[in-house]
Amino acid sequence: MVVSAAAERPVTRVAKRPGRLARPARSIIGWILALLVIAAFAAAYAYCRIHEGEWTAGTILALMSVPYVSVAHAIGFPDLDVFGDDKVQVIAATLCSALAAYVAGALIGALGRGAWRLIVRR
């Protein structure tokens, strides 16, 4: 039995630059910003729990949660507020803000790499 050359060719195709199509989340700037946001939320939550009962205790946490509350209001949760005694809302606000920080860091990194490539080419 004769096998043609076309039949021996592998079916799978390898990209010219492997790993370029499905890049994992590896923005260093994004990870650093996300970790800083998580640390800031942890510090604000600790401050809120230490100074519980004072009228200014939750102010920092409320201000840091503005992006989360704004998104929640936009998608239809009008009575959402973040207080230090509601751990679920604090965790959700932390994750939302960390994701936004990661995306912002990834965009900054991509723009920086693009600008660097333009500078180096000339």
Image: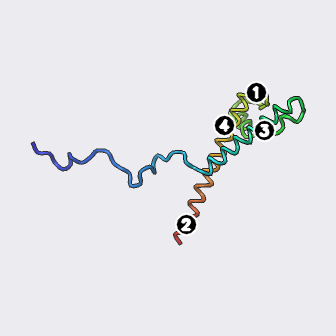
Q: Kindly check if marks 1 and 4 are in contact, taking CB atoms under 8 A apart as contact.
A: no
Q: Is residue 107 above or below residue 45?
A: below
Mark 1 or 2, nearer chain start: 1
Return the x and y of residue 56 as percentages of the image width and height. Answer: 88, 36
Dot 1 corresponds to which residue?
Answer: 86
| Identity, as a three-letter code, of the amino acid under mark 3 | Ala
Q: Kindly check if marks 3 and 1 are in contact, taking CB atoms under 8 A apart as contact.
A: no
Mark 3 or 1, nearer chain start: 3
Dot 4 corresponds to which residue?
Answer: 95
Dot 2 corresponds to which residue?
Answer: 118
Left or right position of 24 against 97: left
**Circle on res. 44:** 3
In the depicted view, which residue is nearer to us: 42 or 93?
42
Q: Kindly check if marks 4 and 3 are in contact, taking CB atoms under 8 A apart as contact.
A: no
| Identity, as a three-letter code, of the amino acid under mark 2 | Leu
Location of residue 3 (image quadrant): top left
Left or right position of 94 against 115: right
| SS under mark 1 | loop
Locate the N terminus by quadrant. Answer: top left
| Identity, as a three-letter code, of the amino acid under mark 1 | Asp
| SS under mark 2 | helix
In the depicted view, which residue is nearer to us: 22 or 44?
44
